[in-house]
Image (cartoon, rainbow, N blue to C red):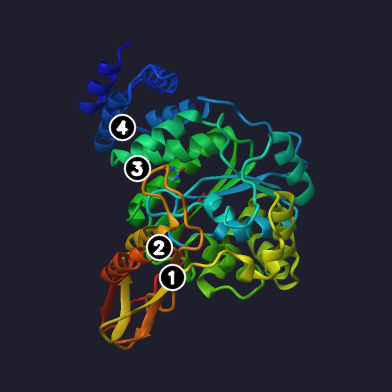
């Protein structure tokens, strides 16, 4: 078998065999296939797509490229949630402690920021002292004792995805359905959860911009998860506007804490309640309605916040900042962004908002960039809001003053103002089971 023939076959739109897909993944992980050949195949997949069978084979090859985790020592039903990536998406920080408070176990491996989207691990690392890398035994102990532990992906888990993701990031091949499916599900299936709720984002800030593409992505991931014996559910949720008001690592953690205190923005609180109740229901804890009531109670009586504080403590973090958020690092510079016209915010290019946050220092342009945890954006006006010329629509935060101007231009360019109030999009656009 030759890599050259596999590339040519896919370039010409032919279907690859299971053996050819396994050959590519096994040899690529061992370093026997160079990045330039892997890039050529990724681009051929981007243009020609993959059949369901090829996508499933690629997913299982990614899953089997490293160690499989064994969660059998975790007591109780294990449930995970995975988002396909968005802007201001700090749901895991709220949903995971709520679900753990209500008796399901959350043994979560999360990612770092990717392109214009943020990552849970970067957000958690903005908590002073918080460790996102633990020995497996400590990880399992924390899940059993606290109910939840969130760490970064271990080096041994799905190494094919690690290599392929870095390559996709620099070869413009991220937003390809079979590649997204195999990346997300390859990692999820290498972990050992009973139930998985997928939060498939759709809209201008998502990797899948149209509802049709998001549905296809959700369907493919749900089907592959079920084939592997998992209980699966996907919610297609709106990412045509940022979630909540905060974008950027410590700003988002503070907003998550506010939400666990019952004082979060309405859209963000609602999406967290929907996701948490669906996770609990899938885990057999009652109907979605019953679980929702329990989730609301866990916020109202402070038990979910207490679980979050316990998780932070168990992972070496300073839980004092959970009760007094003035302990988070502060940005040295800030600047208000005002709008130039009157009317309604009719649409925002959410990816542009993510890029503005990146420009302020909240994300990475290269893998080696150091994150400015205090950098980011607080939105004062969102899609559908009425504005007058001169109103402050956002405040930007950064430790590097020279970054402010470009980020401001990006934010203004991404904000459309019109005479007419736009029709409000629902937060959940579809459910795939
Ligand atoms: N998240 C992932 O882990 N992989 C993708 O391809 C997209 C989002």
Q: Is residue 179 above or below residue 269?
A: above
What distance separates the C-alpha of mark 4 from that of mark 2? 37 Å
Marked residue nearer the N-terminal end (4 or 2): 4
| Residue at horizontal 33 percent and vertical 33 percent from the top | 50
Marked residue nearer the N-terminal end (2 or 1): 1
For disc 3, does the CB lie below 8 Å from ligand 1?
yes
Residue 126 occupies which quadrant of the picture? Answer: bottom right
The spot of residue 238 in percent (x, y) is: 42, 63
Q: Which mark is residue 174?
A: 3
Q: Circle 4 sits in a helix, a strand or a loop, which is it?
A: helix
Query: Residue under circle 2?
Result: 400
What distance separates the C-alpha of mark 2 from that of mark 3? 29 Å
Q: Is residue 300 above or below residue 204?
A: below
Q: Which mark is residue 42?
A: 4
The residue closer to the viewer here, 274 or 173, is: 173
Q: Circle 1 sits in a helix, a strand or a loop, which is it?
A: strand
For disc 1, does the CB lie below 8 Å from ligand 1?
no
Residue 358 occupies which quadrant of the picture? Answer: bottom left
The spot of residue 212 in percent (x, y) is: 34, 53
Pointer 3: residues within 10 angstroms few (<14), some, or many (20+)? Answer: many
State the quadrant of the N terminus: top left
What distance separates the C-alpha of mark 1 from that of mark 4? 41 Å
| Ligand 1 image-quadrant field | top left
Marked residue nearer the N-terminal end (1 or 4): 4
Marked residue nearer the N-terminal end (4 or 3): 4
What distance separates the C-alpha of mark 4 from that of mark 3? 9 Å
Q: Is residue 384 left or right of residue 90?
A: left
Pointer 4: residues within 10 angstroms few (<14), some, or many (20+)? Answer: many
Q: Are marks 2 and 1 in contact (CB under 8 Å)?
A: yes
Query: Residue under circle 1?
Result: 333
Pointer 1: residues within 10 angstroms few (<14), some, or many (20+)? Answer: some
């Amino acid at each position: 078998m030759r890599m050259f023939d596999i590339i040519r076959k896919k370039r010409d739109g032919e279907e690859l065999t299971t053996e050819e897909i396994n050959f590519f993944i096994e040899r690529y992980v061992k370093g026997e296939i160079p990045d330039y050949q892997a890039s050529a195949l990724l681009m051929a997949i981007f243009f020609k797509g993959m059949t369901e069978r090829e996508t499933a084979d690629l997913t299982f090859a990614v899953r089997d490229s490293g160690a499989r985790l064994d969660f059998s020592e975790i007591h109780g039903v294990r449930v995970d949630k995975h988002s396909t990536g968005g802007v201001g998406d700090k749901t895991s920080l709220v949903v995971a402690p709520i679900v753990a408070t209500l008796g399901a176990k959350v043994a979560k491996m999360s990612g770092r920021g990717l392109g214009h989207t943020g990552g849970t691990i970067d957000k958690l690392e903005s908590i002073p002292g918080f460790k996102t890398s633990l020995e497996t035994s400590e990880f399992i102990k924390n899940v059993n004792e606290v109910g939840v532990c969130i760490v970064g992906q271990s080096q041994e888990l799905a190494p094919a995805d690690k290599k392929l993701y870095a390559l996709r990031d620099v070869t413009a091949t991220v937003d390809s359905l079979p590649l997204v499916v195999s990346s997300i599900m390859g990692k999820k299936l290498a972990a050992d959860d009973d139930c998985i709720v997928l939060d498939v984002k759709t809209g201008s800030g998502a990797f899948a911009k149209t509802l049709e593409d998001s549905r296809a992505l959700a369907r493919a991931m749900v089907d592959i998860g079920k084939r592997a014996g998992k209980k699966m559910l996907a919610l297609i949720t709106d990412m045509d506007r940022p979630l909540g008001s905060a974008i950027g690592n410590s700003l988002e953690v503070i907003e998550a804490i506010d939400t666990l205190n019952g004082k979060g923005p309405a859209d963000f609180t609602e999406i967290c309640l929907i996701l948490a109740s669906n996770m609990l229901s899938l885990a057999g804890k009652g109907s979605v309605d019953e679980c929702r009531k329990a989730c609301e109670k866990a916020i109202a009586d402070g038990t979910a916040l207490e679980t979050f504080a316990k998780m932070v403590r168990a992972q070496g973090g300073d839980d004092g900042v959970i009760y007094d958020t003035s302990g988070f690092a502060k940005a040295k510079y800030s600047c208000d962004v005002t709008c130039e016209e009157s009317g309604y915010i009719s649409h925002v290019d959410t990816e542009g908002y993510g890029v503005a946050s990146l420009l302020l220092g909240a994300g990475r342009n290269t893998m080696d960039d150091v994150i400015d945890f205090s950098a980011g954006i607080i939105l004062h006006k969102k899609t559908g809001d009425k504005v007058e010329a001169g109103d402050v629509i956002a405040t930007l935060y950064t430790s590097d003053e020279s970054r402010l101007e470009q980020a401001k231009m990006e934010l203004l360019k991404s904000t459309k103002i019109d005479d007419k109030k736009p029709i409000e999009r629902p937060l959940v656009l579809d459910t795939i089971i």
